[in-house]
Each structure stands twice: as structure tokens, then as C-alpha cells.
Image (tube, rainbow, N blue to C red):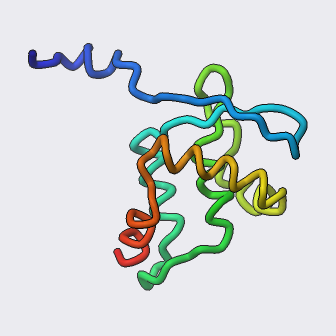
Amino acid sequence: MILSREQILAAEDLPKETIDVPEWGGSVIVSTMTGTRRDAFEASIVLADGRPDLIDMRAKLAVACIVDEAGEPVFSQGDIVTLGRKSAKALERIVKVAQRLNKIGNDELEALKGN
């Protein structure tokens, strides 16, 4: 079956998962990134000269993937540094789910660093 424009745009293709973050006293929703958010995330971890920018990488991924109940981003790019100051244990819990939902493994991260 060939999909129409309307069918493609109406498809629910952003799986989400609610995870407990005891360090923060509650739960967050981690979502698959949209194409735009994935592009922004990938651009944020590479410097202009092509070298990897790993500073706040966990926070960058969390910002790209934490959403509210309506699927809207909870954080903006301006929150990266502040979120990066939060518990590494909490961020790592979020990152693991975000990596799984978005098919971002160590191989993909290495490839991004190389590109």
C-alpha cells in the first residue's frame, strides 16, 4: 500500500516511555525524537571543525527527548547547561531509554563524532 501525504502526517510514529527518576522525585516521559530534534541533537555534539563536542552530551540528549503528556518538549536548548548540572545518575537513566527509543548506540555516537 502506498501511503498518502495525509496518512504519513497522521501516523503516530513517536513512541514514548514514562520512566521513574527517583532523584527528581517523580517520572518523566522520554520520546523518540522528531527528525528536526534529531538533526539539532546531532549538530550539537559536533564542533564547527568536526571534532566531537561531548560537553553536556547527556543533557543535550535529555533535552531532545523529554516531553510532556501532549508530546511537546519540556526543555529548550537554553536549558542544556542547567540540566547538565543535575544528577548524572538521573541523566544516565534517561539517556539509556532515549538511546534505545532512538536507536542511538555507541556505534552511532562514534559515527556522529567522526562526521
* Quadrant showing the N terminus: top left
* Quadrant showing the C terminus: bottom left
Tell me what residue is drawn at x 48 percent, y 28 percent.
15
Tell me what residue is drawn at x 78 percent, y 57 percent.
89
Quadrant position of residue 42: bottom left
Tell me what residue is drawn at x 79 percent, y 40 percent.
21
Estimate the x, y position of residue 51 in percent, counting from the top left: 47, 83
Estimate the x, y position of residue 37 in percent, counting from the top left: 49, 46
Estimate the x, y position of residue 56 in percent, counting from the top left: 68, 67
Q: Is residue 57 above or below residue 115?
A: above
Estimate the x, y position of residue 76 in percent, counting from the top left: 67, 47
Q: Is residue 14 above or below residue 70?
A: below
Tell me what residue is drawn at x 77 percent, y 51 percent.
90
- Please give left or right for residue 70 compared with residue 75 in the image: left
- Please give left or right for residue 1 compared with residue 28 in the image: left
Task: Compare residues 109 and 70 and report the one nearer the observer.
Answer: 109
Q: Is residue 81 above or below residue 104?
A: below
Q: Is residue 100 above or below residue 88?
A: above
Total tally of numbered discs in the picture: 0
- Please give left or right for residue 42 compared with residue 91 in the image: left
Task: Compare residues 71 and 97 and report the one nearer the observer.
Answer: 97
Quadrant position of residue 78: bottom right
Quadrant position of residue 19: top right
- Please give left or right for residue 10 compared with residue 94 in the image: left
